[in-house]
Amino acid sequence: MLTPDTLPALQRALAEAGLDGWLLYDFQGNNPIAGGLLALEGMVSRRVFVLVPRDGVPRALGHAIEAGPWRRWPADWPRSTYSAWRELEASLAELVRGRRIAMEYSAGDAVPYLDRVPAGVLEMVRAAGATEVVSSGELVTRFYAAWTDAHLASHLRSAETIAAIARDAFALAGERARTARPATEHELVEWILERFAHAGLSTDHGPSVCAGESSANPHYEASAERSREIREGEVLLIDLWATEPGGVYADQTWMAFVGAPTDRAREVWSAVRDARDAAIRLVDEAARDGRSLRGADVDDAARAVIVARGFGGRFIHRTGHSIDPRSLHGAGPHLDNLETREERRLVPGVGFSIEPGVYLPGELGMRSEVNVFLQPGRAIVTPGEYQRELIVV
C-alpha cells in the first residue's frame, strides 16, 4: 500500500531505475495492482491517476463526484479533480509532461499478469507529453508482491497444516479403496474443506482431487454429479491451497498411488520430482551466491529435465506462479518461459510456487508442487518436509 512510510523506499527505487515517476492508473478495477497500492474505499467508477514522483509527494487525479473513496489520502498529498474529458487530459499533462514514467505495461503483452493498462490509455499518456513509458515490472515485484515477516509466518503455519491434511487424505482414500464403498473424488474434496475449516483456514475454490485418468487434466474439478471413485491400481493427485485470514496462501500438490505403483507411474513421478528439484537447486544456489535469476531461467531448468526424460511435449504449463500477499496467483514474477516471456528477476521478498507436471491424456498425470520464499542469501522451501517419493496407500 502506498503510504508516507513506504514512499521513501519507492522513491529510491525510482531514482535507481532512472525514472521520473510511477503513474498508477485504474478504471473500475481493471488494474488490481494500482487498486491494491491505493486502497481506495467505496465506489470508484471513473478513471483514476496517481503519480508517485521520484522527488516530492504523490499527486492524485480523480473524478469530481467521487471524493469519498479518497478519505484516507494524506492531507499533504495534492489531489485534483476533473469532470470533462478535456479537464482530465489537461490535468494528466501536468502530471506526466517531460517525464519518463513506469506503468503496468508489458511490451508485446509478454507478461499478461502485469499488462494492466489499456493501449488507449498508453496513447493518451504519451500524447499528454510523457517522454517515455516503461514497464513497472520491477517496482511491482518490490512494492506490491513482496511479503512481510508476518506474511511469511502465516504462510509457514498454513504450509505445515495443509501438508498434514494432504497426507491424511491419502490415507483415508487408501483405506476406503479396499472396502465396498470407495471414496469418491468429490467426497475427498469435501473432507479436505472440512479440515480447512477446523484449522481456521480458507480457500477461494478447490481443492483439486484427481484419480486415474482425471489426473491428466491439469484443471480438473470433481463435482457431486460426475465424481468418480478412487480405486486401487491408479494414481491419485491432490492439489490443495489455503490461507489464514489476512495471511499468504500455501499451495501444494502431492502424488500417491493406490496399491502397488506401476513402472509407468514411477517413471513419470521421477521425471516430475527431478524437474522440481532442479528448479529448487537453481533457486537455492542463486540465493546463496547473491546471483540474479529471471523467472524464465527457473522454468528452463525444470523443463530441461522433463524434455530429457522424453515427456517435454506433455509439460504444458509454466513451472510456477507468483504468490503475493493479496492473491494465490500473484502479480510478482512467475517461473515461466513457455506461456509468457517472464524477464522479471526473482528478488528477496517474493514468493512463488515450483510445480512441474507431466500429463498423459487417458492415462495419468503427475505434478509436484512446493512453495519458495526468498530472503537475502536464502531460499525457504515449504513445506519443511516436502515429497521425495511417490506415496503408496
Image (cartoon, rainbow, N blue to C red):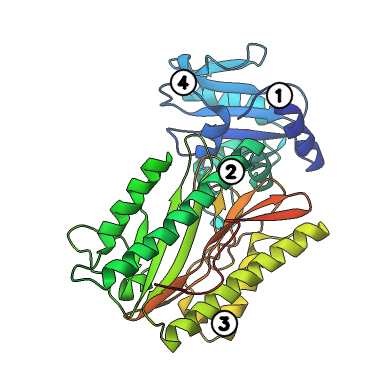
**Whole-percent x and y of residue 285?**
76, 64
Q: Residue at x 37, y 42 (%)?
A: 197
Amino acid marked by disc 4: Ala
Which residue is nearer to you in this view: 178 or 51?
Answer: 178
State the residue position of label 1.
Answer: 5
Residue 206's place in the image compared with 253, above or below, is above
Mark 3, other Cα within 10 Å: few <14 / some 14–19 / many ≥20 = some
- Badge 3 is on which residue? 307
* Residue 291 in sight: no
Comes first in the chain, label 1 or label 3: 1
Location of the N terminus (image quadrant): top right
Q: CA distance from mark 2 to mark 4?
A: 25 Å
Q: Which label sits in the foreground, 2 or 4? A: 2
What's the distance in space between the residues labelled 1 and 4, CA to CA? 34 Å
Q: Nearer the viewer, mark 1 or mark 4?
A: 1
Residue where numbered disc 4 is placed: 84
- Where residue 104 is drawn, which disc sits there? 2
Q: Position of residue 284 (x, y in %)?
A: 72, 62
Q: Where is 213 relative to 87, above or below?
A: below
At x 49% / y 56%, what residue is drawn? 163
Tell me the quadrant of the picture where the C terminus can be found: bottom left
Q: Secondary structure at mark 2?
A: loop
* Mark 1 closeness class: few <14, some 14–19, many ≥20 residues within 10 Å: few
